[in-house]
Every structure is written in structure tokens, then in C-alpha cells.
Amino acid sequence: MTVKETLSEKMRKGTLHMTLLDPAKQDPRAAAEICGIACELGTDAIMVGGSTGVTQENLDRTVQAIKSKVDVPVIYFPSGAHAISPYADAMYFMSMLNSRNTRMVMREQAAGAPIVKKLKLETISMGYIIVAPGMKVGEVGEADVIPRDNPKLAVAYALAAQYLGMDYVYLEAGSGAPQAVPEEMIAAVRSAIDIPLLVGGGIRDGETAARVKRAGASVVVTGTVVENGEFAERLKNIIQAVKA
Ligand code: 1GP
């Protein structure tokens, strides 16, 4: 079964949680430890990626270390074609739909596609939509961020992703965002599209995770929360809220 099929089957039963690890932020062994705990707490997949600082070397070593520790899918979440790991179970083949820079929309993808083909990596296509404030990823991606009070614009981009044949849509407030994507926006996108909806950025507690889930996310993504030493209790609350 492909990663996409595995995730689709799980999504039929309920909302999923994915844990994002940035390979530039800790050594591979620490990343694997964190993922081991996240899996014990019930996370459904590991995403590996970051906006800056990802190299072929830290990516490969991190993915390999995580793979040796956990059984859930490990999915590469790329920031460009400069690093692509053959060790990941799949990668999001994604386009930042609301970037002003065509490099983020399609040129990096064209650069990476032949490498992906050669590596025979499973791809899951994704329309990546940056919502204000967008944080680092919005800045380096030169995103025309979706204003938080404009759910209609988010819907328009999400529908465009669906009509382009993309597998998933990701509403991203940016890692470390002070607030998550507004519920009204999540709900509007959810009711407009038929494909899975990932939501991430600024989700740090169970209450926020519950609101994001109730608004209609198919997958709740958290990253920063595992970067602080004592994260197990917090992550447990988040995953419980997602699975409730
Ligand atoms: C980043 O949405 C994710 O792509 C995770 O964001 O680090 O704020 O959890 P946080």
C-alpha cells in the first residue's frame, strides 16, 4: 500500500495528527527520540522539513534515524530541489500557490522532478497556501499571505489546487505563528473542497488543536511543540484532542 493509500484509509476513520521535525534544529538521534515519543502518543506520520538550513546531509541522516525508530510513514516536506531524500517513504510534491516567486510555484518543482523520478519516490501533491502571518516560510517563500479575515481568498486558492488535480491542500499560518489559521477560514475551505485539508502553524495546545479539528482539518500538523525539552504532556493533549 502506498503512503497516500494508508493515510486515506486512516482519514476515513477520523482526523489525523502529524509531527513535523526540522532536520536543522536537532541532531538525528534527538529527532528519532522525539519521533519515538510522538508515535507512542499516537501521531500518525512524521513530516521532515524546514524553511532554511535543510541540507542533503542533515535530511538523509535525520530521515534514516527516524526510520530506524518508528513504523509510521516518514514524509519529506521540502523547501526546494536542493535536497531530496531517497530514504523517506514519500514526499509532498508541493507548490506554494500564493507565492509571488515562480520559483516557489513551479521552477523548484521542475528542477526536482527528474531527481524524484530517478529515486522512484512516492509523491503526494499538495497545494501549499500561506495564511497571515506566514512567519519564516511566508518570508522566504515570498508569499502574498492570505489575510486572516479573507476566507474567500483561501477558498479560491484551495479550489484551484483541487481543480489542478492536487491530492491535498495545506493551510499554513507559519511555524511558531502566534495564532493558528482562523477557524472560519478552515471551515470555509473544508466545505468548498473534497480533498484532504492539512492545517498547521501556531497549534501549541489541546484546546487549539480541538478547535482546528472541529473546524474541519483532516490533518492537524504540529512542529514547534516538540522542540522544547518537556513536550510529552503537551503533545499528548494535542493528539488526544485530535483523536477525540
Ligand atoms: C509548519 O505548520 C507547521 O509547517 C508547524 O507549525 O511549528 O507552529 O507547530 P508550528
Image: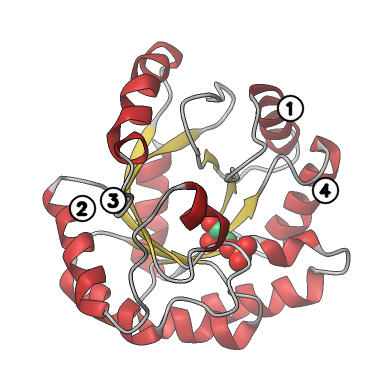
In the structure shown, which secondary structural element does the residue marked by tag 3 occupy? loop
Quarter residue 196 falls in: bottom left
In the structure shown, which secondary structural element does the residue marked by tag 2 occupy? helix
Identified by mark 4, the residue type is Glu
Q: Is residue 235 above or below residue 124?
A: below
Tell me the quadrant of the picture where the N terminus can be found. top left
Identified by mark 2, the residue type is Ala
In the structure shown, which secondary structural element does the residue marked by tag 4 occupy? helix
Q: CA distance from mark 4 to mark 2?
A: 35 Å
In the structure shown, which secondary structural element does the residue marked by tag 1 occupy? helix
Q: Is residue 150 visible?
A: yes
Q: In front here: 109 or 218? A: 109
What number is the disc on residue 61? 1
Q: Which residue is mark 2?
A: 161
Quarter residue 181 falls in: bottom left
Q: Which residue is mark 3?
A: 97
Q: Which of label 2 and label 3 is nearer to you?
A: 3
Q: Which residue is mark 4?
A: 33
Identified by mark 1, the residue type is Arg
Label 1 lies in ligand 1 vicinity (Cβ under 8 Å): no
- Give the mark nearer the N terminus: 4 vs 1: 4
- Give the mark nearer the N terminus: 4 vs 3: 4
Q: Which of label 3 and label 1 is nearer to you?
A: 3
Residue at image point 41% right, 47% down: 6
Tell me whether circle 4 and circle 3 mark residues in contact (CB < 8 Å).
Answer: no
